Image (cartoon, helix red, strand yellow):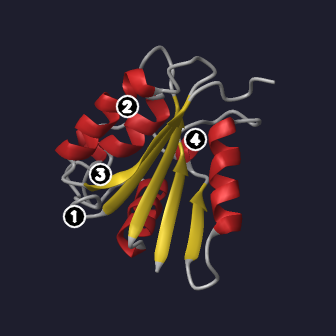
Amino acid sequence: MKILAISGSLRTESSSTALVQALAKMAPKDVEFTIYHGLADLPHFTPDLDDQAAPISVINFRALLQESDGVIICTPEYAYGMPGVLKNALDWTVSSGEFVGKAVATLSSSPSEFGGSRFHDSLLLTLTALSADVVEGASLTIPFVRKN
């Protein structure tokens, strides 16, 4: 089984990235667990490049998605929404269809008591538009991340 994990944060000390790294360490030996580190390399989405002339970073991202059996998206909440870099990455898959029928689990985190729950519905709405198979019971919101 191949799992692709995406952290929706570019921050060096990101809690979302730390959570994805912890999941990778807990993955069974027979699971190939890949963490995608290319969000910052994806250009701003434009339909003008959404064809055979897509940038190599987009081609590589799409290939990783195609090769995976499932995807874990772990992202912080920014201003009650998903980070722009994550939305941009998802936009690159609208016409190419890598998420169609793909099993997806979501984790969101926030330093507030809401744990990212305020934006989670918008993430799920975007994944629904992509025809992803959001696995029931495989979504988690984590409040008070980074609180001592």
Q: Which residue is mark 1?
A: 101
Which numbered disc, 1 or 4, marks the residue closer to the eye?
Answer: 1
Determine which of the numbered discs, if any, sits on residue 127 in the image. Answer: none
Q: Which residue is mark 2?
A: 120
CB atoms at circles 2 and 1 under 8 Å apart? no
Image height of 70 relative to 146, above or below: below
Which numbered disc, 2 or 3, marks the residue closer to the eye?
Answer: 2
Q: Residue furthest bottom?
A: 30
9 relative position to 4: left or right: right
Query: Where residue 133 sits: x, y (%)?
Result: 25, 58
Badge 4 amino acid: Ala
Q: Which residue is mark 3?
A: 93
Q: Residue at x 37, y 31 (%)?
A: 120
CB atoms at circles 1 and 4 under 8 Å apart? no
65 relative position to 134: left or right: right
**Pointer 4 or 3: first along the chain:** 4
Q: Which residue is mark 4?
A: 40
Neighbourhood count class around disc 4 (C-alpha, 10 Å): few under 14, some 14–19, many 20 upward: few
Query: For the residue labelled by badge 1, is the local secondary structure a helix, a strand or a loop?
Result: loop
Image-quadrant location for residue 7: top right
Badge 1 amino acid: Gly
Q: Residue at x 69, y 33 (%)?
A: 11
Image-quadrant location for residue 117: top left
- Distance from Cα at disc 4 to Cα at disc 3: 16 Å
